[in-house]
Amino acid sequence: MCERTVTAVRGRNRIYTAAAAALLLFAGACGAVREAEKSVFAMDTVVTVKAYGDRCGEAVNAAADRLTELERRLSATDADSDIGRLNAAGSAAVSGDTAEVVSRALELCGSTDGALDITIYPVVRAWGFTTGEYRVPSDDELAAALGMTGYGSVSVNGGTVSVPPGRMLDLGACAKGYASGEMLKAMSELGITSALVNIGGNVHALGSKPDGTDWTVGIADPFSPNELLGKLKISGCAVVTSGGYQRYFKDDAGNVYIHIIDPATGRPADSGLVSVTVIGGDGLLCDALSTALFVMGRERAEAYLRGHGGFDMILVTDGGVIAVTEGIADSFENVSGMPVEIIYE
Ligand code: ADP
Ligand code: MG
């Protein structure tokens, strides 16, 4: 953690003129905001948290502790986590966090008609995405794995989650979004009003920058991921991108297989989109929808937006078109050479 502190002249002169007071305030506005930053590795990615104002050092530690706690509860690859125990036993008493994430995720599995499916784990595993030992499963193996999926079979009863024998949960598409929101909550409880969390590209802002202006979030160019597609100005919301370029492998023939699976086929999503960014106030919703809308493709994504609302999005098609919802069109600066279309709700 690196904590920088530039303290304003404090309490030495009890009596000062109005002009001097104004100067002190000015110094406060320009250079006296305390700032703390911490980076950790969690949820299989690099996580950075920044907080501003009094107690910022304490706040970034509290946020990191909360993240560690959530990872211990939600990780599918940790045998001792709530999800690890559930996947091994078919039923488990879980923490309030896990029950909440599973319940909210199940609602989104339903509203997206199964484009999001938190029981997709056997299929993700068949492709080797859980271990990094990538392979193309045979049709029979894929059919067997798909037979072990279906979010409708998951039940949450108070603090107990149950699945039929052999079924497994994977919260990989929404855990980071829930975590970023909880990290901001932990900081806000300490009185922080300006903070930014970045979980491997899942960005979530508490309030605005300390000077009151918007944060600028870079959106990666899916065709050239080290370069920017555009910049988005936001305050107090999550910006979550799902892209085929984030994790994939190629077979000997050069075919590309991405880590976002279409639960209807068990194969990597092939919907004509190369990246989906969802912007909204709720981290879990944005994370879950970035994955689901990627699976759905542009037409279904737009229909979902019109039917449900509550978020904005930036879609990039494999034909090189950027489609941006009207709600954020003015906040998005396109720095790519691609054309931008506006999506009207
Ligand atoms: P990332 O976590 O890499 O940023 P996503 O949020 O899009 O990307 O989540 C992708 C992860 O979610 C995959 O690695 C896999 O574990 C899981 N997953 C893949 N396809 C689906 C799906 N259709 N529904 C739910 N989870 C999925
Ligand atoms: Mg996601």
Image: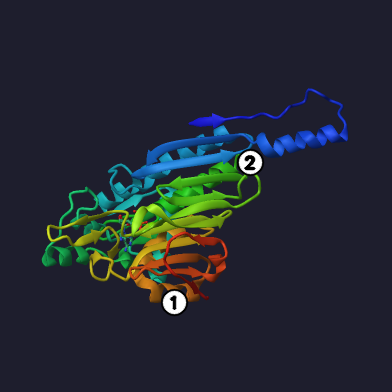
Residue 240 image position (x, y, % from top left): 44, 56
**Can you identify the residue that label 2 sits on?**
191
Residue 80 image position (x, y, % from top left): 30, 42
> In the visual, does 26 lie left or right of 34?
right
Q: Is residue 113 visible?
A: no
Is residue 268 or residue 185 the one in the foreground? 268
- Residue at figure coordinates x 40%, y 47% from the top left: 200
Callout 2, which amino acid?
Gly
Callout 1, which amino acid?
Ala
Is residue 10 or residue 263 the one in the foreground? 10
Identify the image quadrant of residue 319: bottom left
Q: Residue furthest top?
A: 12
Label 2 secondary element: loop
- Disc 2: CA contacts within 10 A as few (<14), some (14-19) or many (>=20): some
Q: Is mark 2 within 8 Å of ligand 2?
A: no
- Residue at figure coordinates x 66%, y 35% from the top left: 31
Is residue 93 or residue 329 the one in the foreground? 329
**Can you identify the residue that label 1 sits on?**
303
- Residue at figure coordinates x 60%, y 45% from the top left: 194
Residue 172 image position (x, y, % from top left): 34, 53
> In the visual, does 317 lie left or right of 252?
right
For the image, the number of numbered tags is 2
- Give the label, 2 or 1, closer to the camera: 1
The quadrant of the rendered image in which ligand 2 is seen is: bottom left
Label 1 secondary element: helix
Identify the image quadrant of residue 108: bottom left
**CA distance separating discs 2 and 1:** 39 Å
Q: Is residue 287 visible?
A: yes
Q: Is mark 1 within 8 Å of ligand 1?
A: no
Vertical placement of 94 versus 312: above or below?
Answer: above
Is residue 140 or residue 336 the one in the foreground? 336
> In the visual, does 298 lie left or right of 50?
left
